[in-house]
Amino acid sequence: MSERQLRLSEDEVASGLVTVVGRPNVGKSSLVNTIVGTKVAITSPVPHTTRTRVRAVLDRPDAQLVFVDTPGLHRPRTPLGERLNETASSSLEEVDACVLLVEANAPIGRGDRFIAELTPKGTVVVLNKIDRVRPGQLLAQLERAHEALGLEGAELFPVSARSGEGVDELISHLVSLMPAGPRYFPPGMVSDVPEAFFVAELVREQLINFAEEELPHSIACRVTEWEWPLVRCEILVERESQKGIVIGRGGQVLKRVGTAVRAQLPEGAYLELFVKVEKGWQRRPDIITRLGY
Ligand SMILES: Nc1nc2c(ncn2[C@@H]2O[C@H](COP(=O)(O)OP(=O)(O)OP(=O)(O)O)[C@@H](O)[C@H]2O)c(=O)[nH]1
Ligand SMILES: [Mg+2]
């Protein structure tokens, strides 16, 4: 038993907030999903998938860690991009640990270093996607990470959010960093994302995966009616021409999206999808706020 555990009082465990930050697309949401063992955040091969802060709970007999998944930090080009950055950087306040995620299979560059400079002292560096590199490459990348990030003495953990390799070691280390405290979330609660918001996210995830190159950023989804099992979800696009792409020939795209989302919902769900044009919403802070971003 460690010294810290000896100091725990009866209702206390190792507990705290762990914020996960990094460039877009490095695998933050995938890692958080793997850590908590269920899908709490949507993921995609396209950058800027996550638009909100998502809290996900890892509850164990000896510990409760609340992971905070954040939007990828980047050089913003739209008011939406600025909002995403604000959400991510404000998530770095008052954390018990910070995970800076970088990729094992891509150069660690200025974008990563910029984020490293925003992180608090004692940040844990995680090299993700090790399933994509050979052992020799991984060693070289681990060496480069220290230098490129400028985080002298930072602990480095190679993982694969996809295969789960290295994730247990990372979790054990993070548990060891937590102070003693109460459980902040009730048993069984795995995330703080409201159900309706999550369904809208599932719709957006499918659209990102089906839609064409430029479209993902232009799509926003929101549930407008929740009369379980009836769920009505509105899909916003920015231009009239994008409406057709989202609907697809003969409604094919919407149909595939609906089927894929329903497969992830409790049986009997009846999902209605509508497409609406909200001109240039990415550049309109009032709409960005209304969408919950
Ligand atoms: N091969 C491999 N791919 C991964 C791994 N982790 C994530 N990915 C892929 O990387 C892409 C991005 O993953 P996300 O989890 O959405 O990345 P993110 O950092 O949350 O991205 P944003 O929300 O846009 O900032 C997806 O296609 C994932 O499937 C991994 O360990 N190995
Ligand atoms: Mg994400």
Image (cartoon, rainbow, N blue to C red):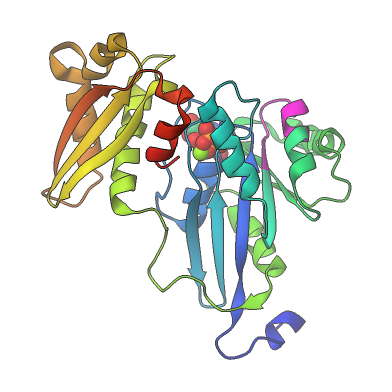
> What is the magenta range?
101-113
- 84 sits to left or right of 257: right
Residue 230's spot in the image, x, y percent?
A: 12, 46
Compared with 35, 137 (above or below) is above
**Which residue is pictured at 61% across the width and 50% down the height?**
91
**Which residue is pictured at 48% across the width and 25% down the height?**
46
**Which residue is pictured at 34% across the width and 54% down the height?**
194
Is 110 a magenta residue?
yes
Name the quadrant of the C terminus. Answer: top left
> Residue 206, located in which quarter of the rendered image?
top left
Residue 34's spot in the image, x, y percent?
A: 49, 50
Give whichever of 119, 137 is nearer the camera: 119
Numbered circles on residues, count: 0
Is 54 a magenta residue?
no
Can residue 177 be seen here? The reply is yes
Residue 140's spot in the image, x, y percent?
A: 80, 33
